[in-house]
Image (cartoon, rainbow, N blue to C red):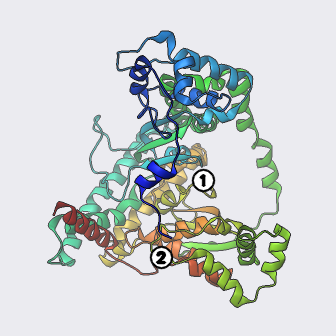
Amino acid sequence: MPFPSWPMIWGVMWKYAPEVFSEDERRILSRYFTNLDKPVFALVNLPEVVKGALFARYSRSAKSLRRLFLDEFFEDGKLSEGSAVTAGVTRAEALYEKMLADYGDDSVAQLGGVHLACEQASNILTKVLERGRLMAYLEQSTRYVPYDKPLANGRYKYLVPEEIGLAGLEQAYREHMDSLFAEYIALFGDVQARLLETVEKDPNDSDFVYRSSVRAVALDGVRGILPASALSNVGIFGSAQAYEALILRMRASNLAEVRDYAELIKVELDKVIPAFLTRLDRPDRGGVWVRYLQERNKPLRAVVKELPTQFEESPRDDVSVRLIRFDADGERRIAAAVIFSQSSCTMSGAYEAANSLTAEDLAKVIKGYVGERENRRHKPGRAFEETSYLFEIECDYGAFRDLQRHRMLSIDWQVLGTSLGYAVPEIIEDFGFTARYTAVMESAEKFHGELMKLCTSAVSAYAVPMAFRVRFSLNLNAREALHLIELRSSPQGHTSYRRVAQEMYNCIRNVAHHSNVAYAMKFVDMGNYRLGRLSSLREEERKNQGISR
């Protein structure tokens, strides 16, 4: 049966009784709500603290939200004329003080959100900023933004950690960082020039598409020279609760940059959502939390040192992906969840039915559940969350940075160092620049060793180029695996993380033997593309031309 038109839904099927407001009330409400006569509306021109408090009261009031605002939050019947709206702030702050500080009702801290810009953060710090699962992030790309312009102070874009200066190593550190950036700039120019010489321009490509794709490939090839101290910009959107957890983690860090940045974040958040963060500075709340985070792993380090840990020799491939753990009956668990949601049987009955399926019928159930996916944004439902995979991955730090930002999974990583070796991009080898690239990495490895004599491994990591490999684990369910693998294997992706995604797919199909899950991953791209960015730019230009017509 076709869906009825929207006017029919609104005019005939939907029986909404608009609330009646006086002319004065309508004048007030029109400034703060996007409409006054429909059941769906947005809140505008209000501080975050008021929006959150309104919703907190909303859950325990019989009043409509607009009536609640008029009765309890619009103070003294006065409409603020300035651009800085203060309506309801006093009431909201009092409510939060009671619900957060006194009652400990954490859910209300999810109701206020802030967009926050974090600039000139090292690539060590960005991983801390982006660790929270329930936040949204956008980070400046090393693939499309060259690091060839200095800051306003004339320095290249890298951080000198406070700990480096205290160890008396600032001068040596700066000289080494400057040499890395100088070689990055020189090699970028050389690789880009060779690409322009060797890659023919398609007659159908505009000059912009051609040069942009060549530039992106050149940046891909040389970004491994950039150190982890390279500065980046991160945009964050999150709830007050997520920011509270972030600041707690950062205050407990063993790195000065992270601790200092925590206070910068707190100062700015206090300007827009102060009532949400009152617990952070209370010794019996935030103080205790930070001490717990600082102290909790100290006894563990001694225990781990005593364990008979087995160290395996890491393969010297650029990328290593190992499937450490999976559910042998994972596909039947997916089928059980499907059967449960599509029937009236118990969960135990659904498992019994799933376990009795033949291989052919199991495939029918899962394939029927997946349906006909027309693009990678058409994803199976939550039954795919019933089985999971634990991967151990070793790849260059640059690729790790991109994979780390996936949030609906569990990830942990070891401190970046030089012991796992480094990756040499294919394009560097093709153009005969391997000796130059290798010389940079060997120099960096030597300098890292010198730092390790006087600094901790966490501080020494700032000096390590992104070409060096890092070991990390990914624990994710089949639904998130489908999303990550299809997205990160797309042709325009970086070669390193494309290989990681492709190997993850191979592990699911050939090691776990989850052929039906692998079948669902219809948009995994197993190809190898030298100018992968070119295809996406061509598509983008084609769409833009269509719009302009």
Q: Are marks 1 and 2 in contact (CB under 8 Å)?
A: no
The residue depicted at 54 percent of the width and 54 percent of the height is: 449
SS type, badge 1: loop
In the image: residue 398, left or right of residue 315: left
How many numbered discs, if any? 2
Q: Quadrant of the C terminus?
A: bottom left
Local packing at callout 2 (Cα closer than 10 Å; few below 14, some 14-19, many 20+) is some
Local packing at callout 1 (Cα closer than 10 Å; few below 14, some 14-19, many 20+) is some
Which quadrant holds residue 530? Answer: bottom left
Q: In front: 304, or 63?
A: 63
Give the vertical position of 33 relative to 414 (above or below): above
The residue singled out by tag 2 in the image is 523
Q: Amino acid at mark 1?
A: Val
Chain-order first, disc 1 or disc 2: 1
The residue depicted at 77 percent of the width and 85 percent of the height is: 357
The residue singled out by tag 1 in the image is 415
Q: Position of residue 417 (x, y in %)?
A: 56, 56
Q: Amino acid at mark 2?
A: Phe
What is the residue that sits farthest to the front in this orientation? 12
Q: Single out the mark in the foreground, 1 or 2.
A: 2
Give the vertical position of 268 relative to 206 (above or below): above
